[in-house]
Image (cartoon, coloured by chain):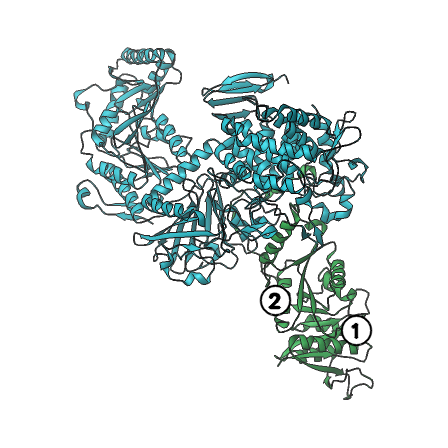
Amino acid sequence: MSRVIAAVDDSAQALAVVRTGEAVASLCGSTLEVVHVCAGEDDTAPAGLASGGHEVRLLRGLGSRAIAEAAADRDVAAVIVGTGRARPAEAFVGSCAQQVITAVPVPVVVVPAHARAPTTIRRILIPLDGTRASSDALRRAMELSAQADVRLIALHVHTDASLPMFSDQPHHEVRAWSAEFIRRHALPMSAESPLRLRVGQAGTEVLAAAVQEGADLIVLGWRQDLSAGRAAVVRSTVLGATVPVLLIPTQREAQNHYPVVNTRGRAAAAAPYPASRPESR
Amino acid sequence: MAASLAPSHSRRAVRCAVALPAPIARRFEAIVFDWDGTAVPDRQADAAPVRALVEEACALGMDLAIVSGTHVRNVDGQLAARPTGPGRLLLCLNRGSEVFAVGRGGPRLVHRRIATHQEDAALTAAAELTVQRLADRGVGAVIVSQRLNRRKIDLIPEPAWAEPPKARIGELLDAVERRLRARGVRSLRGAVEIARRAAADVGLPDARVTSDVKHVEIGLTDKSDSGAWVVSDLWSRGVAPDLVLVAGDEMGELGGLPGSDSLMLVTEAPGVTALSVGVEPRGVPAHVIHIRGGPAAFLGVLEDQVKRRKRGDVPRVTADPTWSLHITGVDDRLERAHESLLCVADGRLGSNGAPLVAHPAAAPSVVLAGAYEGDGADIALVACPRWNRLAGGLSAPATLHRTLDLRTGLIHHRWDASMGRVEAVAFSSLVRPATAVLRVSGVGGPRPEVLPLSTDDQAASSPRSNDLRWITSEASAGAGQVVASAVTRATGPVAVERLAVYALQSDASQAASRLRSGRRAGFERLLVEQRMAWAKRWASADIVIEGDDALQQAVRLGLSTLMASAADVGEAAVGARGLTGEAYRGHVFWDTDVFVLPFLAATHPAAARAVLEYRVRRLPAALAAARARGRSGARFPWESAADGGDVTPHWGSDRLGNATRIRTGEMEEHIVADVAWAAACYQGWTGDPMFAGGPGRVLLVETARYWASRIEADSNGRGHIRQVIGPDEYHEEVDDNAFTNVMARWNLRTAADAAATSVPAAERRRWLGIADSLVDGYDEATGLYEQFAGFQRLEPLIIRDLTPQRPVAATMLLGAERVAGAQVIKQADVLMLHHMVPDEVAPGSLVANLDFYEPRTAHGSSLSPGIHAGLFARAGRLADALAALRLTARIDIDDLSESSAGGLHLGAMGSLWQALVLGFCGVRPQGDALRIDPHLPAEWSALEVRLRFRASNVRMRIESSKLTVWATPPAKIVWDESVVEVDAMGHQFGMAERKS
């Protein structure tokens, strides 16, 4: 049986991390192991460490490295961490959490500072932006929850610039568009599955959708890249979510293969209609 | 790669083994060839081997044309071929002046250039003057014979050169030029120049002056006329130039003159493959393939063609990018959209262009028009069993090449499988609708395996004996159930053919006989039929845009899709995506009546009639729907499918997942007038008296009765139509929508006029009174129609200024609630009146309403840009017109809606045709005449349109300075408020001379 590791510290978030760990372990059909990283020579857990009644395994070493080493075992299905204290202005999680989410090769559930810890996970929101990362995340989430009675809610956020041009008869169009979106991005779901659509800034809309849909967990695929300009949705979601956020690492997106079509026209299509249609469409 | 041909059985004596170079080691669909020196060594030679091959090639579907300077007795007497088809044998004789079609009964004259007396006399004078001028220089030359439309002058009337064989042409040239030079004429070319000047001096500036070295000939025609005639004839049979081989023995220059056979390579036929089997003492041009060997080599080529057909070689399709759509590889993202674009259909059966072998990104689809399953709003097209599936897969997606030939409705597939390359061609027979044909051949590998008919992959493993048996779709039993059957047979060592038929279960016996007759006809005959049928459609529908190849391709894609979407017998249920996909469930909307039907009425009236028949047969349901609402007459449904009941759902979800009430079925009642308008549109183009006096009148009358019962009078006696949705579906439950009201008014008036003998006068007077009472929102002060009561009080939001990106689904951008409270329009609404019923709106009101409403239009419907393109053109705003037109043309080809995977936007394609014909050409039926008022963008050098008006085939060509119109039989044209009768000789109108 696989394990879910909940890494706790002595902060107030520890109990939420453990409770989230319990829910995630139940979702995955795994056992939960609560771990604490001991600094220095100390070999006892701090007094009052919230473990939710679970036995705490003590890890030695540098916090994030010790967690990463523990997560390297083949039977580890996921790691649960709290956000910790984010000190630099640009940081959205504490340094330990940041090192864990960027280094650990397994899914990491981040429990935001103000998140409610779910007792069970029944509704999972999966934002899909058409990238391979998001498709992989959906696939992984489905694998993780294969045995559970859980509802996956797929979401796509249109920005103003990516709004569809036409919506002839919306009730037919939504069905056709959604089915094609699912196929186009090779999503592991039925083409008939409902796809929630929203318009606006992705980060904002993901949070709003999580509330509206009563999600217990948000799943995001990402490439563990926090360099400038990257992972905007991950940052804003972890910062603002009121439920845990499951980050699923994926490989870098392969180059899209476009076939050669002898239409002479993609350039022609970019011609402005009347006068002001941007070429980016 | 070269194919080695060995001589066979009785022909061994005349055939030589020839290694064919790669460019001609392929299947051609037609061969045009010279006779003397190419097919036979001389006119005394035994032509039996040629005869046998010619008859065999024609029987296998190949078209052949023999080009010669001599007359029919000579060639037919020597060849004596009597082919029985399906391929055709033409004799293009008398150096371009005559064409004979040869059949079982011998040659039949199909074309002759008849000289006038003046031309005949001038030819004689030109020949005599040439002989005189040569004599003046000391060259003795004689006029040896008078042939049809030409005079022949012997430059070397010496016994030693009386009958020079072709093989000695080099020696002959030397002898002739020696003789000429000795008397001061520098070359053979000089002698030709003397003849040309003589012809010009006697009034024949365009004389064709040619030489076969021994003679100079002055004529009205030459082999280029034969070449042009044959190319045109082949084109009318659906054979494109790049599928044609032109063979001769004099392609290279001789004596400074182009080889006589090179004249067959006319500019009208770019892309033909040229072959010379002659001696060619001065070589051949780079584009000509030269294999020595004379007639024996040519017979080797002909025999190779016969062999290829017998072994089942797959025919090619044109590579002309303005007539084809080619897709290389498989893009996982766009594959389904590409499959829609590559659909082959015949008006009844539609099969998308999915790879023939399994691929995870593919979504194969086969649908039969009118075959629905399910109930109520859930009713949808039946997913039919697939006929076009092969075992195996692609070795690499990049090796897949698919080409849709827009001119013939053929799709060609080529890919590398694990066992070698595979080629296939498939089509849905326009001549035998709901009959699908496939030929597939392994190239360097084993024969591919065609899988049995099936609806799913699991059934693919069922035994092949499934063939020859009926299989039934998985749809629940009932009228919508589809039956299908197929026969599959091996052709040669590596090829296999499949013929499949589909039908509603109630028509199964008819389908069985279709299967038997298709089987008897065989692949090659079915192919010839298909090409000819499509060519015939194009002959009255093509649009040529000179100066924009990308637009040209997209327009032809649109036209071919429209042509393939409607049957031309019985009824045609044309859904919003036609036969190209399963989206919109095959439901029939106003798209069909208003956007698709005009194209059909003006190009193939039988199909338009079938579209109307769909409505006629559902009139009882429309009458019942009106009755159920306490109304009179007929109320057609917004969404229609099998039985004519309304299949519009009542609830759905919008793009944001919000549950929304769908009110179009309840309120979008303009569909009632749209159906009537479609009937009148068909009537306007065709003048069909049977329809006008029968079902057409019934449609007009019953729809008028509906409006008469639907319109409410207020206390002032003004008529109103309340609680409707206009074409602008962003605003629901509005009162007095201008479009609905004016269309209803038009409906009442038109019916009153059409039903003078069938409806009591009192009822008709009542209709006219109601029509006159109807408010239409027109404000004389501003020249504007108010889109509906209260529109001007809405938030004056101008979407053009709000967002740089139109078209846009405005309800998503701004939210449905805000849009409903603002002057943001989904698509042309008031402006649809100017488009559809220009005589029913205030004269001169187009520009004011275009200026007001277009900036407020989001164009969130794919039906909108095309209509605006036409209106902009009529208003003379050609830059905006062109931008809107190009956008419309790219909707599917670039998948702008990201939903082309579910099928192509048939309505938008119809609007594209309307923009070009009604807008840019300014064409509109006006009684028994056709009004033309063209507008040509500076970017185009010419716009040419073909259509049918009443009984005439009309062709019009618009250039910057003139309009030329041809009509066969003659037709009346309204030009600049004058009526002119135009015939096949054509009539020119000066664009600058227009007064109005």
Q: Mark 2 or 1 closer to N-term?
A: 1
Mark 2 neighbour class, 10 Å CA radius: few under 14, some 14 to 19, many 20 or more:
some
Judge by depth and name the residue closer to the eye, B56 or B733.
B733
- Give coordinates of residue B111: x percent, y percent: 34, 24
In the visual, does A61 lie left or right of B617? right
The image quarter containing residue B832 is top right
Inspect this view and state whether residue B171 appears. no
Q: Secondary structure at mark 1?
A: loop
Q: Colour of chain A?
A: green
Is B773 drawn above or below residue A156 in the view shown? above
> Label 1: which residue?
A84
Q: Secondary structure at mark 2?
A: helix
Instruction: Name the kind of residue labelled 2 in the image.
Output: Arg
> Label 2: which residue?
A139
The image quarter containing residue B834 is top right
Q: Are marks 2 and 1 in contact (CB under 8 Å)?
A: no
Mark 1 neighbour class, 10 Å CA radius: few under 14, some 14 to 19, many 20 or more:
many
- Give coordinates of residue B59: x percent, y percent: 29, 40
Instruction: Name the kind of residue labelled 1 in the image.
Output: Gly
Inspect this view and state whether residue A18 appears. yes
Which residue is drawn at the image coordinates 68% and 34% (left, top)? B709
Judge by depth and name the residue closer to the eye, B364 or B719.
B719
Which residue is drawn at the image coordinates 72% and 82% (left, top)? A34
Number of the label disc, if any, that sits on residue A95: none
Q: Chain of mark 2?
A: A
In the visual, does B140 lie left or right of B372? left
- Give coordinates of residue B892: x percent, y percent: 57, 45
- Give coordinates of residue B976: x percent, y percent: 60, 18
Q: Chain of mark 1?
A: A
What chain is colored cyan?
B
